[in-house]
Amino acid sequence: MAIISRKKNIYPISSSLRKYLINSGRHTDLPITYDDLLRYDNSIPLIDKKNKDTLWETVIYPQDDMKSIHHQVKKIYALLKAEGDLSVMEHLFVDRIDLCIYGNTQPFRVRIVNKINDNFDYFYIKKADASRVYGLELEHLLSPNRISYYVSGKTLIEEHIIGIPGDQFIREYLGDGHLNAIRLSKEFVKFNERCFVRLLGDMHSSNFVVDVTPDFEEIEYRIRAIDFDQQSYEGRKAIYLPQYFKQNNPLIEIGFRCLTPETVKQYQKEERSLIATRLKAGRNKIATLLKTMAADELAPRENVLSLRKQLAEYYRNDKFLKCESMGALVRESLMTLVDKPDSFLKQH
């Protein structure tokens, strides 16, 4: 069983990481910051359709500030969705701004509504934590998913990742007669492998969504991480394997029924091959990112020492023991896809 030991430290954006973000077009001037949104003078609990507390609170701003704040957050939405084209704002309004009171970085979530058809979307305004930024960039470069985000000073903005929350999917959809158990199990194996290879931790069912796409004959599934705070932080290998979180057990049980050890290895190998292909396609940019990441402090020293020992034992590769940072461990883990592509063909 995988359990996060304690609340994660927050790491600032280093000058080298900021330089990478500027060169990658991820750094920009924002019309409003995270701290600006803290100027609310009241809040009310946000209750869902089933009358349950969501643990988010809708914040209320003074009347003098509200119009300006809403206008500025609409500008951010235009930046995320239309490269800053303000014409998209014409029919949009800010329905509400929510604050996650229990989150590690206490993010704000903005709900944007199109007044013509009542269609809505979300985006997030957060404290800029280096771990999360590295997690977002690695997801963008190495997974099948593209991510839109920007950093400015100590503020991070992120697009909303669409999908059914993992805990809700497990609770409400696993009993669906149309569920394709084999395809779902295959996707979980591949998701498990993606997280482990790039050391993304804490992927229990509340931290990923399931994107369900009807095909002309069947249903396709894509599991997508939505929380990147635990990018290469914890010191235990199990934290980077979603299969070890008890919240994910219903998905594991379906896999046991549907897949053989041989097919699991096949899907692992397929996913590692895909990641290796992305590594080669973006080798220069990824090399720069990993060099920057290796120089940054992203975890306590004891976590680095513990994880490097476990990875060295797992891969039977003493190169991990020479890694002095979490970024260096991520780089060495990714290099196993190129140097020793079959070294993982065993039970995690």
Image (tube, rainbow, N blue to C red):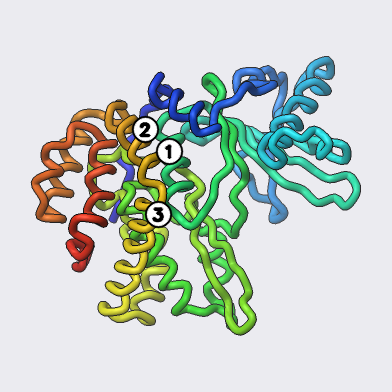
Look at 59% across and 50% down and name the residue there.
Answer: 161
User: What's the amino acid at mark 1?
Assistant: Asp
The one nearer the camera, 294 or 100, is: 294
Q: CA distance from mark 3 to mark 1?
A: 23 Å
Q: Is 207 left or right of 315, judged from the image as shown? A: right
State if disc 1 and disc 2 touch (CB < 8 Å).
Answer: yes
The one nearer the camera, 154 or 341, is: 341
Which residue bears the numbered disc 3?
278
Q: Is 306 left or right of 9, judged from the image as shown? A: left
Q: Which mark is nearer the camera, 2 or 1?
A: 1
- How busy is the neighbourhood of tag 1: few (under 14 within 10 Å), some, or many (20 plus)? many
Look at 60% across and 25% down and name the residue there.
Answer: 28
**Image disc number at residue 229:** 1
Look at 41% across and 37% down and name the residue there.
Answer: 134
Find numbered disc 1 in the image and state the secondary structure of the residue it sits on: loop
User: What's the amino acid at mark 3?
Assistant: Arg
